[in-house]
Amino acid sequence: MHRDFIYLDNAATSWPKPESVGEAMVDFLRTKGGNPGRGGHHLARQAARTIEAARSRIGELINAPQSMRVVLTQGCTDSINLAIHGVVRAALKCCPPDFKIHVVTSAIEHNAVLRTLHCFASDGLLDLVIVPCDHQGLMDPQAIADACNERTVLVTVSHASNVLGTIQPVGQVSRAIRERSPDVLFMVDAAQTGGHIAIDVQRDDIDLLTIAGHKGLRGPTGTGALYVSERAFPESCTNPRLFCERRGGTGSIAPGLEMPTHLPDALEAGTPNAVGFAGLLAAMDASCESIHEHEMSLTAQILEGLKTIPGVMIYGKPTIENRMPVVLFNIKGLCAREVGAILDTEHHIAARGGVHCAPELHNAIGTCTDGGVRVSPGTATTPEQIGRFLSAVRIIAESSNER
């Protein structure tokens, strides 16, 4: 790695991780590396305590009513698939043959949501409505509620766009949905917001919340969580609205061929990534409120600096208000991937050019062909590094103008 390397791709995954993350993972492998819930010996008990501590901390972070409602997963995409497949399969099992279920989502969604829903819609198993957004990537809560009907089983929206960083008013969305369709399940993709801004599943009446461990929470990859509400999985119900096709050992109930009917075991088959969650637990212990403030200060510096460079187009909200530490831009005359490559090879700056797995949003803002260049500062980013990035963009833009 070049000694002057600048990492501005934290929206993809945060880097570098806190030192304590690697230390906790090494310590787990050396002293606690048993299989949690699958043995009575001390290593298995130590591993189980690590898993439950991570579950409890995530529950506190999102104000879950009970930690058992936090299902640990392989990441946010895994959580999204578990939720969408679960809701759709449960609805298909319960509905009469001539009843076609209905799902509402938004144009800002990541392909983790869109492709998962599309696989059912393309097979004719559900009707899918994608509600458009405005040019700043903001959703209208009432438009989402109005898209619901008597066949709607799920509404799913991102808490914030991974492309523009625009934060959605999920509380308003939830209230609008409840007024029109009280029993619809409401899912929120918090991949970009977890660890950055406050999330309260009880206040905002969220049924399913998907979380990434490796972004704002600064944990290792391969870690995530799915919060499941009482509405989605009643504690006393043998027919939940979330059906899990994943089968296997849980360690809690060994005899019999049926999966456990209680959370989290009903949705957690197989050996969990205990070493990863040891790292995630350490990352959450290392977090503090000033991190997000620092990143937003750098985002403001990026926005103001890019505005002064001729030929640069900035997308989304013009200020840091209602925005995550994410900025999307293009340079006139150059495709986004080319700019990303030049930043990498000539200036040693890691950014991401392309459509960022969110094609509907790029269609909405007019960048569907080439996408844009996304930069996202992190905890270790400095104002001096942002200054160097802006200088690099100016050099690239001036070179483009001379062509």
Image: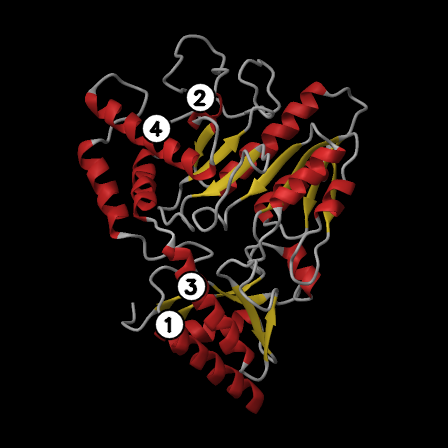
What's the distance in space between the residues labelled 4 and 2, CA to CA?
Answer: 12 Å
Which residue is disc 2 drawn over?
Answer: 265
> What is the residue that sits farthest to the top in this orientation?
255
Q: Reading the chain from its start, which is encountered first: label 3 or label 4?
A: 4
Instruction: Give the residue type at disc 1.
Output: Pro
Residue 313 rendering spot, x and y as whole percentages: 60, 75
Dividing the picture into quarters, in which one does residue 403 lie? bottom right
Which residue is disc 4 drawn over?
Answer: 52
Whether residue 89 can be seen here: yes
Whether residue 124 can be seen here: no
Q: Nearer the viewer, residue 199 or 114?
A: 199
Q: Nearer the viewer, residue 335 or 158?
A: 158
Instruction: Give the residue type at disc 4.
Output: Glu
Which residue is disc 3 drawn over?
Answer: 377
> What is the residue that sits farthest to the right in this orientation?
98
Q: Residue at x 35, y 75 (%)?
A: 384
Q: Nearer the viewer, residue 332 or 59?
A: 59
Q: Residue at x 27, y 18 (%)?
A: 39
Q: Is residue 75 above or below residue 51?
A: below
Badge 3 vs badge 4, beta-carbon distance below 8 Å: no
Q: Reading the chain from its start, which is encountered first: label 4 or label 2?
A: 4
Residue 240 rendering spot, x and y as whole percentages: 59, 20
What's the distance in space between the residues labelled 3 and 4, CA to CA?
Answer: 31 Å
Q: Secondary structure at mark 3?
A: loop
Which residue is disc 1 drawn over?
Answer: 383
